[in-house]
Image (spheres, grey):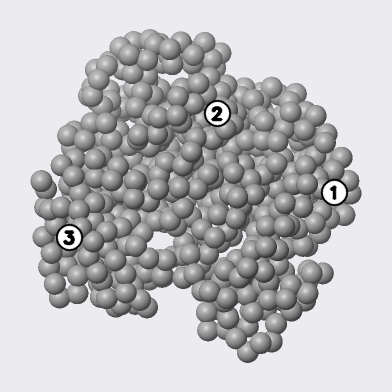
Amino acid sequence: MPTLTVRIGERSHVLSASVVLPVEAGESLSVELAAGGHWFGHGFSHVQPYPLETGRIANEHFAVNNIQCPAWMCSAGFVLLADTAEELTVRINADGDVRLTVACPGAAWQLHVFTAPTFPRAHRSFLKFVGWPPPAPAFAPGESFFCTWTQFPRCLTQERIISMARQIRAHGYPCTTLIVDDRWESCFGELEFGRDIPDPAALVRELHGMGFRVWLWVTPFVNREAATFADLAGRRILVPRRDGDGAALLKWWGGTAGLVDLTAPAGRTWYREQLLRLKRAYGVDGFKIDGGDAKYHPPLAEAAWHDYPGASGYSDLLLALCEEVAPHACETRTAWRSQSRRIVWREGGKDSHWGLDNGLAALVTLGLQSSLLGYDLLMPDMVPGRVQTMNVADPLPTDELMVRWTEASALFPLLQFSYLPWNYAAPTAAAVRGWASVHRALGPYVAELWTDRTSPLLRPLWYDDPGNAQLYTIADEFLLGGDVLAAPVLAAGVTQRDVVLPAGTWVDAWNATTHVAGRLAGHAAPCPGMPLFVRASRSDVLAAIQPVLARIARGTVPSGITTATYIAGLNRDLNVTG
């Protein structure tokens, strides 16, 4: 068995078996990263290193913020889990010291250690402990989700939703879920349709008639200006102030609000009834869950929670309630210890650029880290990121970025669009549509994986070949299941790249040439044309995707151009140019 030395406070422990160790409040766990080999886990970081030791993370207030879990795992065959919902201090090579340190200043906690002769075996023990996998979803894989957010940010109307749905059908996308995002409400937290959606029941009926399930964007915030705010504050449905003067307030990106106290029976009952009312009154099928992050709690010194759940405990209460109301019909970007929930996981908003700093490259590395943490029923953020919704002065994504983003996303278990692909010129739109078709053709294969969740759906190259040391540092390739390998292009202007193949015999899905494990130097990667390989034993998967790939015109989208001119600003007006 491997060994790993960790230090807790003044005590050293040589770990060689799975164990639970107590850690006192304020004590630090400290591990030399080099002793464990390569490190993974942690979850979202704005700059997303993979493996973790290749970057620097200093988080003095580590608590739920997008998809995370306080677990760190290493290629030597260990998983370290901080079993707490309290705020942590986490530093990973923060000062170039090549150490992992974890502390909880405010409370004692337990360190769960899982180990085995190989990393995948230790990893499976960790996943079993946290409750992975949840039951397989009832819906069929392979569809493209569409969301209104980047196409109609804060300028949403009933007519625009219907128009978007009709365009999706006209362009032939395999989509059965349409997500109605921000600004459907009369006011944040009222959970009632506003003036721009005058007949929501008719809207949902029409969308159902076109074959769409309808999910609504919801948060646990009730804004101060909401008509219901005073009543909810008076009934202590919102987290109250300690001094008894109404609701404790917080600031979020939508304004100043109170937070529904899901630790209180009255708060939980009220929120549950609002979601059920949306389903019963209008036929809504599910929900896009936003919020739940620790940074969007009211200040603890001012809040009189019914039963404070810790900095990271609230998000799971929110997910549990939504799962109860609409199992497998909800998606979320926030999680801490929720791997057992019947929820679709979504990467938090990505910026529409190339890099590891929350761009396209980070989409891939966060996908790998999230899946290893047990959040593998995963969709990346909307293709091609947030566009101009964070800053209206940002440039529109280039055609190349749009295609490359789609190529990488299409090999995730789930795929989501918002900024409409047909905003671009015909060759670009056709390339994007082609990759959505590849995603659809992989549906039966993904359905097979869903029914046999013994390993993550999305996985790093080393997972089925743990003895191959060179695979642990590859951050720009990934496997869907064990038999489909994607090598996305994550930088502008690149038309060829090296590809590393793990153990086995692989078939190039573009030209049916066969390759064995090893490095393919300078492999063709035109735009469109992401390198894609299928294990030779899976002739069924190859037969499903090759006819679809044959319809993609490789190399037809040049670098450095932007044919899209569609702009939808962050106000109530829609501005379309071109």
Q: Amino acid at mark 1?
A: Ile
Residue 316 visible: yes
Is 134 left, or right, of 149 in this rendering? left
Q: Which mark is residue 333?
A: none
Distance in Å between CA atoms under marks 1 and 2: 30 Å
Local crowd size for mark 1, using a 10 Å CA cut-off: few (<14), some (14–19), many (≥20): many
Q: Earlier in the sequence, mark 1 or mark 3?
A: 3
The residue labelled by disc 2 is 141
Q: In the image, residue 576 lies at what x, y percent?
A: 78, 42
Q: In the image, residue 545 lies at what x, y percent?
A: 49, 16
Distance in Å between CA atoms under marks 2 and 3: 41 Å
Above or below for 105 versus 3: below
- Closer to the camera, 270 or 4? 270
Is 122 left, or right, of 417 in this rendering? left
Q: Which mark is residue 32?
A: 3
Q: Amino acid at mark 3?
A: Glu
- Closer to the camera, 300 or 174? 300
**Quarter assignment of residue 248:** bottom right
Q: In the image, residue 546 lies at what x, y percent?
A: 47, 12
Q: Nearer the viewer, mark 1 or mark 2?
A: 2
Distance in Å between CA atoms under marks 1 and 3: 57 Å
The residue labelled by disc 1 is 197
Local crowd size for mark 2, using a 10 Å CA cut-off: few (<14), some (14–19), many (≥20): many
Instruction: Identify which residue is drawn at 24% across, 45% down.
Output: 122
Q: In the image, residue 465 lies at what x, y percent?
A: 23, 31
